[in-house]
Each structure stands twice: as structure tokens, then as C-alpha cells.
Image (cartoon, rainbow, N blue to C red):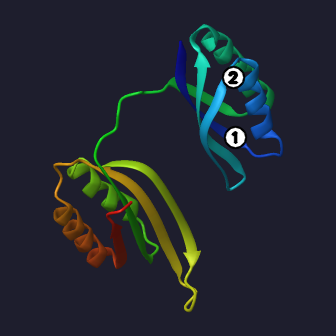
Amino acid sequence: MVRQWILTVLGPDRPGLVEELAATIRACGGNWNESRFQELHGQFAGLVALTVPEDHEESLQAALTDFAHQTGLQVQSAPGNVNEVTGRELTLECVGQDRPGIVQAVSDVFKSLGINVDRMQTAVESAPMSGETLFRAVFDVRIPDTADLQSLESRLAEIGDELMLDVQVDPAG
């Protein structure tokens, strides 16, 4: 039987880390399925979803421990969850002057409506004309079939007014 695993990887960035991690996974019979990696302020940060034969799980865990010691990276693993995720997919984009509390305010609305964040990407950038610092966030979320889309949009509009954010909701995902 094949089991799913999720890895998180964090530590000082350098060339070759992805290849070394891939070789470690492959040497244990694992199959790399999905990943997200990014260099953030000199740190290598990533997530990997993989599958491995059940009888190779212990060797994978040992190999990941060795990999962490050799590379200086922090590596954590957890079994994947195979439950079917339900609900409507939405994409939301928020753009406005950078200030503390934007992610907390938006995610509070999500929590209150039972909305799950599937993916979130944020960045701070310079505004094209003024050069002021802008905060941009893109959320891919899953809204329960029972949730009211109009309620979500009105709550986000309130936050937009409070924090001077432009909030766009794309129901098509």
C-alpha cells in the first residue's frame, strides 16, 4: 500500500537543495507529487507532497533525519490526509497600502464563515506611480456550499473600507 506524506523544509538557501531532497525521497522509493518552494530573505522554505510505499516509511523518516543533519535544514513530516475536500473554489485578491493587520482581518472573515484557505500568496511592492508601499495578497479559498457569498463580499467590503484595500472576488476560482 502507498501512503501520502507532507514535508516542510526550512533553512539557509544554497544551490542543490532541491536535487538533494529529491534524491533522498527517490532512494526510499518515494514519489514526489506536488511542491511549493521559495527563497525568502536568504532562507529556503518549502512544502512537498509525496507518496511512499508503506514498508518504506521508516527508511524515509531515517533518510530525512540524515538529510536534515547534512544540510542544516529543518525537515518535518506528517502523513497526508486523503479526505475529499468539498465546497466552491474562490480566488480573492486584496491590494492596498501596507499596514499591520490586513491578513488577520481577512482571515478572521474566512474563519467566521467556515472558509478554508487552500493557498495564500502575499507580497509587498512599490506602487507604480507614487512609489508608496503596497501590500498584495491572493487567496485561493474553499467556501462551504452552505456559506453565503454575498455575506462574504459585504464583510470583505467593510474591511476594504476600514483598511483602504481594493478587494476583488473571483467566483470562478
Structural distance between the alpha carbons of marks 2 and 1? 14 Å
The local secondary structure at tag 2 comes to helix
The answer to whether residue 14 is above or below residue 140 is above
The answer to whether residue 104 is above or below residue 16 is below
- Looking at the image, residue 16 sits to the left or right of residue 8; the answer is right
View extreme (right): residue: 15
Image position, residue 140 (x, y; %): 41, 56
Around disc 1, counting alpha carbons within 10 Å, would you say few (fewer than 14), some (14 to 19), or many (20 or more)?
Answer: some
Quadrant in which residue 22 is drawn: top right
Image position, residue 46 (x, y; %): 62, 42
Q: Mark 2 points at which residue?
A: 64
Residue 11's disc number = 1
Amino acid type assigned to the residue bearing label 2 in the image: Leu
- Looking at the image, residue 173 sits to the left or right of residue 53; the answer is left
**Mark before the other along the chain sequence, 2 or 1:** 1
Q: Dots 2 and 1: beta carbons under 8 Å?
A: no
Image position, residue 45 (x, y; %): 64, 45
- Looking at the image, residue 108 sits to the left or right of residue 10; the answer is left
Image position, residue 127 (x, y; %): 55, 83
View extreme (bottom): residue: 129
The answer to whether residue 96 is above or below residue 143 is below
Q: Nearer the viewer, mark 2 or mark 1?
A: 2
